[in-house]
């Protein structure tokens, strides 16, 4: 007889259920015991540390940036301390109404509307989400004392002492120095600032950007103990690591030259630029652009009017015309044309060309300025009177050979200069290949023609370059063929003035130049400046230091004539080159040449003073002799 499932004893089934439930309970208790053991024994130290960290707060102590000095130790940029009002958003009330109420009251204390407060919060959170918001800098001590007395009402508000860039000379060398600001969200993702932290202040242009790692110090750290309300406990400072200030950067800039150049541009009141450079080693002694701006504006909250003036004005004060200007050069380009013609065997210094005031090629006539006929001219006299016809004919001889473009390219036109400042434009050196490519793509109405080389020979046509590139070209001829690397960084120093590093960039390349050709071109430029009939004789006839200079009057579409002047001094063995251009300044002799003379007067001030007093005046340029001697 067999028993079915329902015929088994009920006690057996109950015992089975009790055994299963008991087993599950034992397993759960075992798991719980293991978890407690894991938490207390294995991870106990970790959670203890986290619990202790909940009782501490860490604060980054911002390090002051290093100062920027001119070559003789004059301060161009340093720091001042400021009290900044900081807002930590996650400490504000969660209720929107209460949050609005606190922000409104805080805005009233800081003289900001609620709309302005919210806009400031939004803009800074877009850049660095989660970082404290800087509502306002340079707050007064009355506000600081009030906030300290009412800390419970404003739990998300703190006041921090920060370092702010200070510019003793206002707008002096603004384009060269650059500015400082909070690192952007884009910079945090790529580029030199990708490993930085949100909210850090970094160089945003000029030397501040290029030498940011030199100037930026290392932040310190303060860790304090707080109570349950997040308030510091008495004697609660646990760790204090002081910040390490940044190193100082000494530039190649000669303060007197810089001031004279900027003053010369400002006096003429027209957009323009200048560069003064050592022809042997590329040290920039002065570099400026007009209109300019005061970098102090970036250290404070900008008004809409200030934003419009800087970013939307037709004057474009942020635009550095010295390094990124896109201009034809007029007759200052003739130095390059002369060298190309001589080195190409098309003429010799003695070759005479008949200048009848114009030439006709095909159906187009090319004239001298104001139709003047200069008669028979050789290289030197053609440079002295700036005979366009002489150089038109040289350009015509180089038609379809690319020889003129070759020499211009070798001397640095239309290519990167290597300057240790951010430069985003290299200009344009027009060529047959360039125009014919555009023509094939339907982007221009005609292919390259002889007229293009004729125009380029006198610095016209589609040429787009700037004072720095032209200064490098002239320096290359002056020093015998070394294409220098222009630079503003001289050396790095610590706070005590000890030299930590010196900058001595190598030349970019060497161009072989026949010494006889060099001498002939320099002689022509010398006669242009200081011989009767020379194009800049009116400015330099009585200048006591021998110079070699070339005027330029460039035609620019939609504008009046642009004035150029490039001068090498002293002649015949130049130490410096100065290039000046003034938009809509007229003939080169009218605006740019006198402006360049003011710069030379500043550079040779001591020598000119001794000469006027009857002394010999040997080697006594402006600035400390130990720095200026030997072209330094």
Image (cartoon, rainbow, N blue to C red):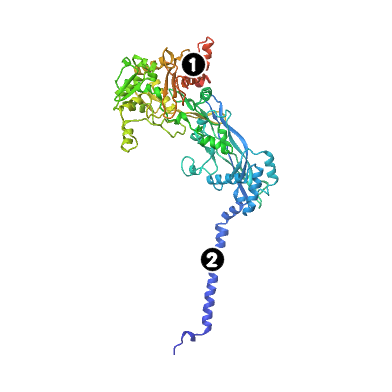
The residue closer to the viewer here, 244 or 594, is 594
Q: Secondary structure at mark 2?
A: helix
Q: Is residue 325 left or right of residue 46?
A: left
Q: Residues within 10 Å of mark 1 (few under 14, many from 20)?
A: some
Give the image location of residue 608, x and y in percent: 51, 14
The residue furthest front is 363
Q: Is residue 19 left or right of residue 505?
A: right
Q: Visible in this render: residue 251?
A: yes
Q: In which quarter of the view is residue 79 placed?
A: top right
**Residue in the image at 47% along x and 16% along y:** 539
The residue closer to the viewer here, 571 or 386, is 386
Sequence order check, earlier mark of 1 and 2? 2
Give the image location of residue 462, x and y in percent: 37, 30
How many labels sit on residues? 2
Residue named by callout 2: 31
The residue closer to the viewer here, 9 or 407, is 407
Residue named by callout 1: 619
Q: Visible in this render: residue 572?
A: no
Q: In which quarter of the view is residue 519 placed?
A: top left
Compute the Cα span from label 1 to label 2.
90 Å
**Residue in the image at 46% along x and 13% along y:** 541
């Amino acid at each position: 007889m067999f028993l079915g499932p329902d015929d088994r004893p009920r006690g057996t089934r109950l015992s089975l259920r009790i055994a299963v439930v008991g087993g599950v309970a034992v397993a759960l208790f075992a798991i719980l015991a293991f978890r407690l053991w894991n938490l207390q024994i294995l991870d106990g130290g970790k959670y203890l540390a986290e619990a202790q960290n909940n009782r501490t707060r860490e604060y980054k102590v911002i390090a002051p940036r290093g100062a920027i000095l001119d070559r003789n130790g004059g301060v161009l940029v340093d720091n001042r301390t400021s009290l900044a009002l900081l807002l930590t958003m996650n400490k504000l009330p969660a209720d929107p109404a209460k949050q609005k109420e606190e922000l409104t009251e805080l805005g009233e204390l800081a003289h900001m509307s609620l709309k302005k407060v919210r806009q400031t919060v939004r803009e800074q959170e877009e850049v660095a989400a989660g970082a404290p918001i800087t509502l306002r800098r340079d707050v007064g001590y009355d506000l600081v004392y009030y906030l300290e007395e009412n800390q419970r009402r404003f739990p998300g508000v703190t006041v921090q002492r920060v370092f702010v860039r200070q510019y003793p000379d206002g707008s002096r060398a603004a384009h060269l120095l650059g500015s400082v600001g909070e690192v952007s969200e884009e910079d945090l993702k790529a580029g030199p600032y990708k490993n930085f932290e949100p909210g850090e202040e970094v160089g945003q242009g000029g030397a501040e950007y290029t030498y940011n790692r030199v100037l930026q110090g290392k932040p310190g750290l303060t860790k304090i103990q707080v109570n349950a309300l997040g308030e510091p406990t008495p004697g609660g400072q646990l760790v204090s690591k002081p910040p390490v200030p940044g190193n100082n950067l000494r530039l190649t800039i000669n303060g007197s030259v810089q001031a004279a150049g900027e003053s010369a541009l400002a006096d003429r009141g027209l957009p323009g630029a200048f560069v003064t450079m050592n022809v042997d080693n590329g040290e920039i002694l002065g570099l400026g652009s007009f209109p300019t701006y005061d970098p102090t504006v970036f250290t404070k909250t900008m008004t809409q009017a200030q934003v419009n003036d800087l970013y939307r004005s037709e004057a474009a004060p942020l635009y550095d015309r010295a390094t990124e200007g896109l201009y034809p050069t007029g007759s200052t380009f003739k130095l390059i044309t002369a060298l190309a013609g001589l080195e190409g065997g098309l003429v010799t210094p003695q070759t005479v060309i008949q200048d009848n005031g114009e030439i006709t090629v095909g159906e187009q006539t090319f004239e001298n300025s104001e139709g003047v006929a200069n008669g028979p001219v050789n290289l030197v006299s053609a440079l002295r009177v700036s005979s366009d016809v002489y150089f038109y004919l040289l350009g015509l001889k180089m038609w379809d050979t690319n020889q003129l473009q070759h020499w211009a390219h070798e001397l640095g036109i239309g290519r990167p200069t290597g300057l240790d400042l951010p430069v985003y434009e290299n200009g344009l050196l027009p060529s047959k290949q360039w125009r014919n490519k555009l023509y094939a793509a339907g982007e221009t109405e005609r292919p390259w023609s002889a007229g293009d080389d004729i125009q380029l020979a006198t610095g016209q046509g589609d040429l787009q370059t700037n004072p720095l590139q032209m200064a490098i070209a002239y320096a290359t001829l002056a020093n015998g063929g070394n294409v220098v690397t222009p630079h503003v960084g001289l050396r790095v120093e610590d706070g005590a003035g000890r030299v930590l590093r010196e900058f001595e960039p190598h030349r970019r390349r060497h161009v072989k130049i026949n010494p006889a050709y060099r001498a002939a071109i320099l002689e022509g430029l010398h006669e242009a400046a200081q011989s009767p009939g020379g194009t800049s004789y009116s400015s330099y006839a009585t200048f006591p230091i021998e110079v070699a200079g070339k005027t330029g009057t460039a035609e620019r579409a939609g504008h009046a004539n642009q004035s150029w002047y490039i001068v090498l001094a002293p002649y015949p063995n130049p130490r410096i080159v100065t290039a000046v251009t003034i938009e809509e300044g007229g003939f080169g002799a009218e605006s740019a040449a006198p402006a360049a003379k003011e710069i030379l007067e500043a550079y040779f001030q001591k020598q000119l003073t001794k000469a006027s007093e009857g002394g010999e005046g040997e080697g006594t340029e402006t600035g400390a002799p130990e720095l200026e001697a030997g072209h330094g």
